[in-house]
Amino acid sequence: MNPLRVWSAWVLPLAVLGACAPVGPDYRRPVLEMPANWKPEAPWRVGAPQDAIPRGEWWKVFGDERLNKLEERAMTSNNTLAVAAARLEQARALSSQAGAALFPEIRLNSGINRFRTSADRPLTSYTTPTFSTIQYDYTLNVSARYEADFFGRVRRTIEAAGASAQQSAADFENIRLLVSADLANNYVTIGALDNEIDVVQRSIALQRKALAFVSARYEAGTASGLDVTQQQAQIDATSTQLELLINQRTRVEHAIATLVGTPAPTFSLEPRPLALAPWQPPVGVPSDLLERRPDIASAERAMAAANAQIGVAMAAFYPSFNLAPAYGLESRAFTTLFDIPSLLWAFGVQSSQLIFDGGRAKAGQRFAEASYQGTLAAYKQVVLTAMQEVEDGLGTLVALGRAQEQARAAVRSTTRLLELANDRYAGGLATYLDVISAQQAQLSSERIRVQVLGQQVLASVFLVKALGGGWDNTAAATATASGPALAAAPAVAP
């Protein structure tokens, strides 16, 4: 019998059956009811999307070279990001592994055995006695294994593995965004602390001058020792605040060291007042978030993978068919191994149909369906959280803008108040307690001003993260010139 003819007789019908649609629901991305617009206050406006712009180095919009270098170090040396990259490679490898099931597994097998048969083995014929022999067995053959995917178990498995790999890619992008945003937050915080430290140090310098002035008046008999003591107490209190700020800065510096993959004891950042200006990133309509945020893309891909697993579970109720052909040679002597009588072959199909398993397959299907419902709820929650974060960011930037104007006005007022208090004290029209109160008010208002500035930049970073990160600098600058625009960020490919 021609083995190729036998092979064709089995394979062609199986191939036709293998073209059947896989069991289980086909994945369809759920349609969510999204609001048409945000609720931004003036001067925000809706702008055109920029989805074609590559995602990436969003931090460069702040124009700070030191921040850019730190971010580059974090992108190459951060260990959390390295873990995410390794998991992405694992997911891609698993996806490739699952895809290999579409093709037959072909092996070349060879062997040589020397064996002795038993003289007492069962008789194959009562007329022929058995006796012991010692022989060689030489084998050389090609074997194949292949599962005919009639009901889509393999295809659904590949679909699930591919969606999981895409989910890992989105997770990697999300961790990259979180690391870069965390680093930017710490960098802004340390700059704001440097601003605040600078304010406190200048206040201490002015307070020491005031102490020298009061001491001179005390020595001249025109001021009391109480005035000197009060001024010294003010210096001591302000110096205590300075030490606390320095300690806080040190801890933030250590956090930056960890983010850029450097041991904290060997890392330092030269003090530099915050030079970053608040930036209002472009924001799109709420539905844009479904394509822009990597955590939303990850949640959506998790749904696709869970949906495919339902098909895998349902395939357990249908018969499976496996092909295991073999073609080769076998002989008791190597010299005759390649002779025609040594030829052997085998073709056949093995099938299996579940009859009873105590409800195991049904439980597996229910588990897969419940998993999908869980990923669906998680997806909806991620979208709701994203919308909340963007709304919070929009409102915070507007509120902090008003607060900054009020803080500047307060600084002007308290500076004028301190000047008047000093003049009145020098003219004998006020006590030194009035001067101390004015110094405290001026220091407090100046610190609030720099704190609000830091919060404004932090709010910008928060909103960038909430939107998914990454826009074209030129487009952003053009939009900002005519009022903070609401435009879209690059999409995360599902």
Image (cartoon, rainbow, N blue to C red):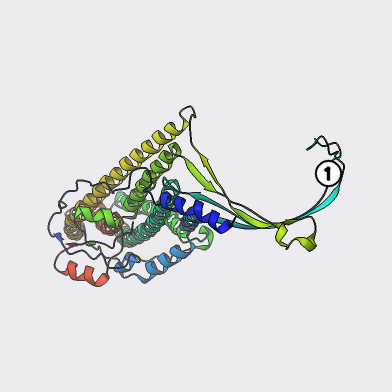
Snapshot quadrant of residue 195: bottom left
Residue 306, above or below 292: above
* Numbered marks: total: 1
Q: Residue furthest left?
A: 42
Q: Residue furthest top?
A: 358
Q: Which residue is drawn at 40% across and 58% down?
A: 176
Q: Which residue lies furthest to the front in this view?
A: 127
Question: Where is the C terminus found, in terms of image quarters?
Answer: bottom left
Front-most of 276 and 50? 50
Q: In which quarter of the image is the N terminus?
A: bottom right
Q: Where is residue 427 in the image (x, y as percent from the top left)?
A: 18, 59
Using the rendered image of the protein, determine whether residue 104 is visible from the camera's viewpoint. no
Name the residue nearer the viewer: 80 or 313: 313
Q: Position of residue 140 (x, y in %)?
A: 70, 58
Taking depth in this image into account, of 169 and 450 the one nearest to the observer is: 169
Place of residue 462 in the rendered image (x, y in percent of width and height, measured from the top left): 29, 55
443 up-or-down from 32: above or below: below
Please determine whether, in this image, residue 374 is positioned above or below residue 344. Answer: above
Q: Which element is circle 1 on?
A: loop
Residue type highlighted by circle 1: Thr
Q: What is the crowding at mark 1: few (fewer than 14 residues within 10 Å), some, or many (at least 20)?
A: few
277 lies left or right of 121: left
What residue sits right under mark 1 in the picture?
117
Q: Where is residue 43 in the image (x, y as percent from the top left)?
A: 13, 60
Q: Is residue 327 visible?
A: yes
Please state if 301 lies on the left or on the right of 396 as rendered: right
Which residue corresponds to the image point at 18% horizontal and 67% vertical from the top-left?
480
